[in-house]
Amino acid sequence: MNLILGSLLLFSILQATHTYGVKASKIANTKQLSENTKRISKRGSSDRILNGNEVEFSEYSSAASLLSLLDNGTSCTGTFISKDVVLTAAHCVYNTTTGPLSPGDVLVSGGTKSILQNITYIYKVEKVLVHSDYNSSKFSNDIALLFLTNSTSDPSISFAKIYNIPVSDETPVEAAGWGSTTKDSSSGPSQVLMAVPIHISSSEDCKEGNVLWESNNGPTICMMVQNEQDTCPGDSGGPLYFTGDSSKPIVGITSFEAVSEDSSTNKCGNNGDTAYFTNALYYIDWILSNTQIDAEDLVFDKDYLNSPTSNSSSASQSTSASKPTSEIKTTSTSQSTFKSQSSTTNASPSATLSINIYTTICTIFLLYNFIA
């Protein structure tokens, strides 16, 4: 019975590949931000790490694949930061109508570079924690934690540390995910984990693309697409790795992208476009307080952790990250506008059918395992 259910689950997962993203213009104000931001939240036929390379999994073994049994089969990427905690983007586990997803509606896969190779690599979620100040219209505080029902004992899974040194344009980073590897929107997701070099930027374009961006040591980190190397829907929530050290600590979490106004396509990889990552270090206090992970086990540079500069910066970030802003209160109507744009572009009839099959079989699988 386990073999049959596992086979059906794998088949159904591979069918859930037909959800689409939304084109966005550069953001000139907060209203336009909510209306035009392109969510990187669906890994389907238009989703990809673009112009990247297949990875040696042992070097990227903290990466996790996430599946939602709701929201048309949304799938994302995440990062193991401990034996029972996965770090991801809030929008990956959040429904704009009902709020955070229920733990039973999310599955985590880890320990393999293949996309959900078999049920051995699947973990159930006990708790979904979305940042209390997350705003789905503006993608502010786009960060969440998933607490697993059972701790992993898989030796092939590593736990990423957080890069706790200020970021500059020269900081070498790569983004990782399981998306499609071509611009053709009819192609499916990559069956193996891919990574792509990302170019951090502090140019004026970062402010033009996202009015909330101030610097790369604030809540979000900006990158500019070069050489058509980019992240796209489905890489959402995934790690932005620091590649200057073999341990590959995480610098950021894939969040959203702004597309040039004169762009003739909503495909990824448009040179000059800007994309944004949630700054993991900015939220270090939030992560520590909610996971009870020891700071020395979570940060990359323990010497920098104890420096006066780090302590001062951390205190400032903690206050700012948890403080609600008046702008959040003024976007309820534009949030619904964004939702309608998303719903009109997300699913075709064939996509809905395959996703319904996927959801049904996954639910049967979960019920069977709970009963067993």
Image (cartoon, helix red, strand yellow):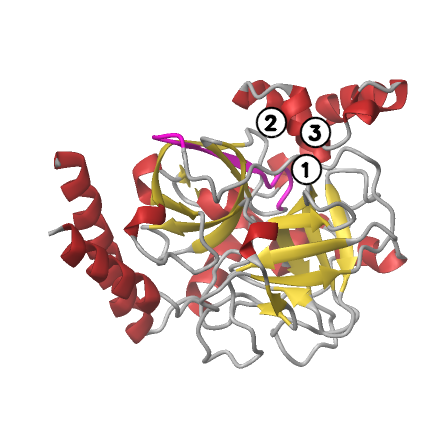
- Amino acid type of the residue that numbered disc 3 sits on in the rendered structure: Val
Which amino acid, mark 1?
Ala
| Whole-percent x, y for residue 295 in the image | 66, 21
Front: mark 3 or 2: 3
Tell me which residue sits at (52%, 61%) in the image: 193
Mark closer to the chain start, 3 or 1: 1
Q: Amino acid at mark 2?
A: Ile
Residue range corresponding to the magenta coloring: 139-151
Q: Is residue 325 visible?
A: no
Q: Position of residue 170 (x, y in %)?
A: 88, 53
Residue bearing the label numbered 1: 280
Q: Are marks 3 and 1 in contact (CB under 8 Å)?
A: no
Q: Nearer the viewer, residue 48 or 159?
A: 159
State the SS at label 1. loop
According to the image, label 2 marks what residue? 287
- Say which mark, if any, is on residue 299: 3
Q: Are marks 2 and 1 in contact (CB under 8 Å)?
A: yes
Which quadrant of the view contains residue 53? bottom right
Labels 3, 1: front one:
3
Q: Does the rendering let one see residue 75?
A: yes
Q: Position of residue 143 (x, y in %)?
A: 58, 38
Horizontally, residue 127 falls left or right of residue 22, namely left
